[in-house]
Image (tube, rainbow, N blue to C red):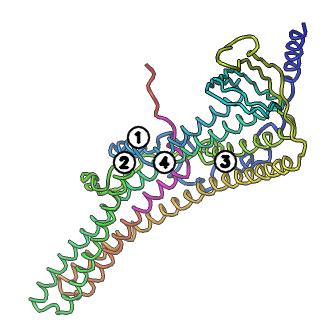
Amino acid sequence: MVRISHLAATTVLAAALAGCTTVGPDYHLPEKAMVNAPAAQGGFVSARGQAAVTAAPLPAHWWRLYQSPDLDRLETEALAANTDLRVAEASLQRSRAIVSAAKAAGQPNLVLNLNAGRAQLSAEQYLLTETLPEATLYDVGLSASYQLDLFGRIRRGVEAAKADNEAVQAARDLVRVTVAADVARAYVDVCSAGDQLAAAQASLGLQQQSYALTQRLVRGGRGTRLDLTRSQGQIDQFRASIPALEAARRNALYRLATLTGRPPAAFETTLARCVAAPALAQPIPVGDGAALLKRRPDVRMAERRLAAATAQVGVATSALYPDISLGASIGSTGVVGDLLKAQTNRYMVGPGVSWELNHSVARARIAAADATQVAELARFDGVVLGALREVESTLNTYGHDLERQVRFTAVKDQAADALADARRLQAAGRTGALATLDAERSLASADSALAALRAQIADDQVAVFLALGGGWQAEERPTP
């Protein structure tokens, strides 16, 4: 009856204590967090009045808007083989294992001990004077324990681990966003370098034609050696610009190779045939602030870190309260000859309590956890503001560069008309070669500047997509 009453009392105690609460604050997104501000939820200021952008939702795989098979293939290869993504995936697997370990802390613990050996026991530890005989001793025991998470230390720990894991997953998604943008930018750089090379070679061809015309005029007595020297100088100048553009294209090809998990030497030579940056067939869909803040992985990562910091306040607070566990053990210890006899058997069942009564350290850790939570909220607000600023800035730059393109195109057209007039006048003997040379220089400069601006606009587009934070979503699979 005594044993039964002890077990019943233990069971009743466990049931009563199991109803205790979880200490520490329950996480909820603070109402005053910047992500909830009305100005952060609306449309983008820099998108107003821009025909090149639309408030339509951003598609998951934005690079498909370019309708470029080469770019689509490169993105698929990079998202499957990029080394940074492999590291991020491994970090996510490690984080998931940590969550499993945190959950396991709330499970019953079962330990089996088996020991046997020849021993000489000390007589004095038993207050004896004669030497005890040698004996073969054994010890067999099975013990079980269960931590009663009465104040939520384990639950808060699991909550923190889960939030940390979700932050790591968001970090993985952020790597995907960055890799997708890096691949698009490298491909754009390859094609833009090809565009600029074509413009430089076209200007070089025009200058060579001008040089031949100047030679004929000199032979006919209507030109000077100075005209030839100046024309040759223009040819040399154009030729000098070509190696730098070729180097830029080759370096972009190297970047594409490594981004897709290949050595630089294994770059795709066929990509060098691209002589025009991929163009969008429609305005860029940018959505609004609310969609942006839900989509961007860095915002999600900062919010999850705030949740983890909040849970850690509960973990620290639980140190103010006792740790109570239930335990039971059975076993047998003695001489091998008396194995499992009544005099060797033992058992124990009952609760255990551990309570640190000096709370100075615990309260200091609570204060540190509170401060960390405040810092994470500030960091979260900063990430939100940074995300909004990046979108506004990239849209603003993109819009102004498009305006510049219109003006530069007009300048190039005017320079082409001026060159045609100068050549007709020079051929008729009404002007000298210097006027034609100046007109050629103006056209070449306008053509080169326009090619460089086209490259900048293509880069602006990728920057907008990167700021919008898309591209991390998993590939859609058709429904069978």
Badge 1 is on which residue?
80
Above-or-below relation of 57 to 448: above
| Amino acid type, callout 3 | Ala
Query: Where's residue 413, x and y in %?
Result: 34, 68
- The circle on residue 292 is none
| Amino acid type, callout 1 | Ala
Above-or-below relation of 424 to 399: below
| Amino acid type, callout 4 | Pro
Q: CA distance from mark 2 to mark 1?
A: 9 Å
Badge 4 is on which residue?
283
Q: Nearer the viewer, mark 3 or mark 2?
A: 2
Above-or-below relation of 79 to 228: above
> In the rendered image, which quarter contains the C terminus?
top left
Q: Is residue 475 left or right of residue 8?
A: left
Badge 2 is on which residue?
261
| Amino acid type, callout 2 | Gly
Residue at image coords 17%, 75%: 209
> In the rendered image, which quarter contains the N terminus?
top right
